[in-house]
Image (cartoon, helix red, strand yellow):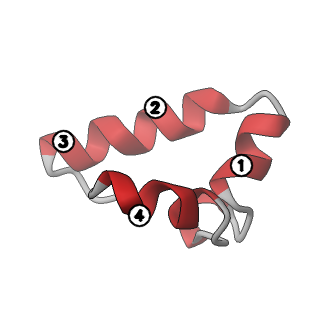
């Protein structure tokens, strides 16, 4: 992901987070969900 896109991505609802934005996930203290997504993307596992 391009660094310029991170600001937009973090505020956009995401199906992988049940429609929540990544920022909402972080605010709820569920940052582990973000790390799992990153891991799966890096390894090629489906998200």
Quadrant where the C terminus lies? bottom left
Residue found 38% across the figure and 59% down from its top: 4
Image position of 30 (left or right of 28): left
Mark before the other along the chain sequence, 3 or 4: 4
Q: Quadrant of residue 12?
A: bottom right
Residue indicated by mark 1: 23
Q: Which residue in the structure is indicated by mark 4?
A: 5
- Name the front one of labels 3 and 1: 1
Q: Nearer the viewer, mark 3 or mark 4?
A: 4
Q: What whole-number distance in Å separates the C-alpha atoms at marks 3 and 4?
A: 18 Å
Q: Is 11 placed above or below 29 here?
A: below
Q: How busy is the neighbourhood of tag 1: few (under 14 within 10 Å), some, or many (20 plus)?
A: some
Say what secondary structure mark 4 lies in: helix
Residue 8 image position (x, y, % from top left): 55, 67
Specify the quadrant that holds the N terminus: bottom left
Task: Name the mark on residue 40.
Answer: none
Within 10 Å of the Cα at label 4, are there few (<14), some (14-19), or many (20+) other Cα atoms?
few
Marks 3 and 1 sit apart, C-alpha to C-alpha, by 20 Å
Disc 3 target residue? 42
Labels 3 and 1: the sequence-earlier one:
1
Residues under numbered marks 3 and 4 in contact, where contact means CB atoms less than 8 Å apart: no
Indicate which disc, 1 or 4, sits on the residue closer to the N terminus.
4
Q: Is residue 20 left or right of residue 37?
A: right
SS for callout 1: helix
What is the distance, in whole Å, between disc 3 and disc 2 at their CAs? 11 Å
Helix, strand, or loop for circle 3? Answer: helix
Res 31 quadrant in image: top right
The image shows residue 23 at horizontal and vertical percentages of 71, 49
């Amino acid at each position: 992901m391009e660094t310029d896109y991170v600001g937009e991505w973090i505020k956009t609802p995401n199906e992988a987070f049940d429609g929540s934005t990544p920022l909402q996930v972080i605010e709820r203290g569920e940052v582990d969900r973000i790390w799992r997504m990153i891991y799966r993307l890096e390894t090629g596992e489906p998200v």
